[in-house]
Image (cartoon, rainbow, N blue to C red):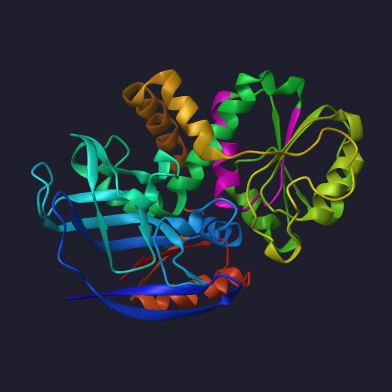
Amino acid sequence: MTAVQVHVRKGALSEAALAQLPLAPLADGAVRLAVESFSVTANNITYAVVGDGFKYWDFFPAPEGLGIVPMWGHARVIESCHPDIAVGERVYGYLPMASHLDVRPGKVTPGGFLDTTDYRQPMSPVYNSYTRLAADPEHDPAREAERMIFGPLFRTGFLIEYFLRGADWFGAEQLIVTSASSKTAMGLASVARQSSPQVRRIGLTSKGNVGFVEASGLYDEVVAYDDLERLPVVRSVSVDFAGNADLLARIHRHFEDALAHSALVGVTHIEARSTFGGGEALPGPKPALFFAPDHAVAFFKAHGPEEGGKLVAAAWREFLKAADGTIAIERHAGLDAAREVFLAMLAGKVDPAKGIVIEP
């Protein structure tokens, strides 16, 4: 049996090719997963762009100079050398852009397990956790595509709102969100609408995406990037998903000391990404990187896995209602399609109104 992987050149992300590798005999205690489906979103572009700095390339080893981009999706157990994991069981979690993955389950519970493979241990346990769908409060067989497309990004948005609410929004009256059409931004806006309705939600986006973002109904106001300077200067927090240094500077210069907090989250505009606070000093607060896995660990430590899971699942169900109909799901078969979609996403050629699902 052979596995197929998509290898991306780290130093030139637009170079990607399929590779076939023989599958080694399964080790004692290990489980072999066949990847059933995953989504390709701007989140995966972020993983590739900052892959070395945040160890995203380290989850799934590849030949020197190459990397395998992580994806979120579903897989089925096709071989098991672990007494508590049965062949045929399905899981959800962090998967390679590939056909197969071997994991070594540890801390196994009815709800999930951790992959304890040696090379994955330096990374956050958030990425090493797999949920067993038979006992997963977030799982809905009819909404698997939405979970892959929105789920990981929604959870980041959930954690951002939880952090800001815990800080009493730094006293802000309004939330400024860049790349408002991105799925993480939509997740943040949804949770803020649910849990912090007193904070006005302002979505910044390109002129071409204004209609799409307005149609989501998640923002109080949607503003094109060119019109940023017409926003009222009141106490605000900014959450930057775009990673565009010029845009971030414009936000800081417009709001100056009225900007109470500036968070950096994603990198969707890779052609003009910021240096996460580097370069010339900006007016207002120093931009602070929001690293979701660290916040996730703190959240589940505070609430426990069961209660924390219920809180996320409740907010997720509300988000699904809000997001219903905002995207058209497209399914593509094969890993060559995954490679093509990744390259199109990298080049900014994928309509945000489309949700892409790959079935290897």
Q: Would you identify the image quadrant in which residue 132 lies?
A: top left
Above/below status of 216 relative to 201? below
- Give percent across and percent down for residue 275: 75, 52
Quarter holding the C terminus? bottom left
Q: Residue at x 56, y 46 (%)?
A: 184
- The answer to whether residue 327 is seen in the rendering is no
Q: Across the whole image, how many numbered discs are drawn on residues?
A: 0
Q: Would you identify the image quadrant in which residue 187 lies?
A: top right
Q: Residue at x 43, y 37 (%)?
A: 316
Position of 195 with respect to 84 (left or right) is: right
Position of 284 with respect to 3 (left or right) is: right
Q: Would you identify the image quadrant in which residue 240 lies?
A: top right
Above/below status of 332 relative to 233? below
Quarter holding the N terminus? bottom left
Position of 212 with respect to 305 (left or right) is: right
Q: Residue at x 54, y 39 (%)?
A: 292
Q: Residue at x 76, y 39 (%)?
A: 287
Above/below status of 284 relative to 272? above
In the image, 343 versus 147, the foreground residue is 343
- Magenta highlight on residue 175: yes
Magenta-drawn segment: 174-195
